[in-house]
Image (tube, grey):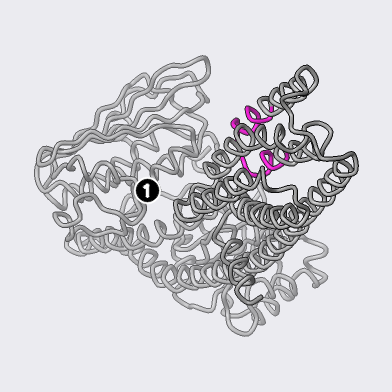
Amino acid sequence: MEKIKKITKYLTREELSMQHRLINIILSIGAMALVVCLIFDFFLGTGARTFWIMGLLIISFLVSLFVANVLKKPNLAGIILAAVANYLLMPLLFFAEGGKESGMPLWLTLASLFTFLIVEGWPCYVFYVLNVLMAGCLLYSDFTHPEMVQRMASRRAEYEDYLYGIAFVVLVFGIIFKFQGRLYEGKKKELEEKEQELIKMNLDLEKANEAKSVFLARMSHEIRTPINGVIGMNEMILRESGERNILNYASSIEVASNTLLSLVNDILDFSKIESGLMKIIPDEYDVFSFIRSCYTMLDMRSKGKGLKLKLDYNEKLPEKLFGDEIRIRQIATNLLTNAVKYTDSGTITFEIDYIKKEEPRIDLILRVTDTGRGISEEGIEGIFESFRRADERQNRNIEGTGLGLAITKQLVDLMEGSISVKSQQGRGSEFTVVIPQTQASSKPMGDFWAKFSTTTGTGENYEESFTAKEASILVVDDVPVNLQIIKLLLKKTKVGVDMATSGEECLEKYKEKHYDLIFIDHMMPKMDGIETFVELQKTDRYKEEKTPIIILTANAIQGADKEYMAVGFSDYMTKPVQVQELEKMLIKYLPEEKVTLKEEAR
């Protein structure tokens, strides 16, 4: 009994497919049934003339078992057995065992049903058609040439053989169905166990993802907060210092802090894209301003390496376009930054052009060409993969996370654009990006350099976009330097700025005085920004005035803006604070009658 269990376990082991297990069971049961038939025939005295036929059939079953389990070809095993049984042994048994007046029609039926169970695919249907034709031929032969059939010794023997056939056919199929049911129950249990494992794995992954999000939020806050201090104070040095050496030092600090900020942003952007939360937010933007910001950034970095910078542009470019300027600028910045990184000498060319499509659609073309190190054919293959740098050994001294081009490619894909690269090792590279955009104005941009010479930038040339000396705002942050930065950045706007270093102090000041706008930092001790906001909403002043409250935070992870807006904040602003964004926010939320816009900001 123990050996039978071991054999059964081997023939139905889990690594086999369901079909393979079923074939093994059918072949095993079929072989045992034939042995029992031989024994019955021996005792009934009816097996002498068919002994060798039954023996061949048993051998066929055993050969099929060998092919299925040793050669691991279960379907071939089924085909061999079906061919031998149906077209050699069954016809011989039909003529030797009494023809249509015996149990042979039942055995022919059993053989055909076996074929359906052990043969897969189109051969199964071929066998079915051939079996029907063969059965028809056998019955026709019995009808037209009865002398060809060896009849049973008596009518009683015919009835006994028929009963014996019914018993065995039902028994064999009953056992097969029982085994099949047990197999499916086992498989069902196995799948249920795997489903539970997958549910557990999914929960573990969700916890891991949540832990990653918490880590990224903390990392974002802990790194962006000091960067905010560095960039903010450096901005004031650039504005107010008149010493050339000091300004040169401050410019170097600006480049270094922006590089650090870029690394942090790369990691956060990659997290957003990976989670499917990166969204393209189209809006109207000024093409000249976009080119100027890219050129200024590149000019500063290229001069630091003694590189020649060339700008090619099409004067007929539409003055204004509709698209996600922030992401397009990020794409251009990534390509330009890469060009500077991998070019030790020579020229970097930034080309901006467009192709007209069906009005008002255009294809914006950004092309960055350098005379740098170039990329090998092997390097180009994986250049847009995450955390991978082309020709790693050669470029191991290059700064960066290896995410810039991967993010660029995914941003281009999100905007349904295309990116291509041409490169020759030692002779430079050319990256071309094509992004569909919509014209917001048919007026051409015109001469870039003429406009560039008359515009002012940041630093000592900074010019505020508005004044609002009657306006009053409250800024809440537990880091004093952050409070000081906002106050200094808004000095020229004449906005009245009050400061609070905790949620409790914010509530006290708000109860005593009217404010047109409140900025609240998120991560503060004791009472954080969200808890402070909830308490502010309970005050009589808030219920009456509905003061705009903006969350000011270093938390820039994916989905953070939606979470803050869902709480009820009027808006969301990330650190480090950019003076242009800060002024835009104030213009948007301060009462119109208290804001006087400068002419260029109108």
The magenta stretch spans residue 120: yes
Image height check: is 17 above or below 415? below
The residue at the far front in this view is: 153
Residue 32 falls in image quadrant? bottom right
| Pick the front one: 458 or 491 | 458
- The region drawn magenta spans 113-128
State the SS at label 1.
helix
| Pick the front one: 384 or 214 | 384
Image coordinates for residue 546, horizontal then vertical, percent:
76, 60
Residue 539 falls in image quadrant? bottom right
Residue drawn 72% across the image and 34% down it: 94
| Pick the front one: 500 or 361 | 361
The residue at the far top in this view is: 358
- Report the magenta stretch's main SS: helix
Residue 475 makes an appearance in the image: no
Residue drawn 35% across the image and 68% down it: 230
The type of residue carrying mark 1 is Ala
The magenta stretch spans residue 295: no
The residue at the far bottom in this view is: 526
Q: Which residue is mark 1?
A: 406
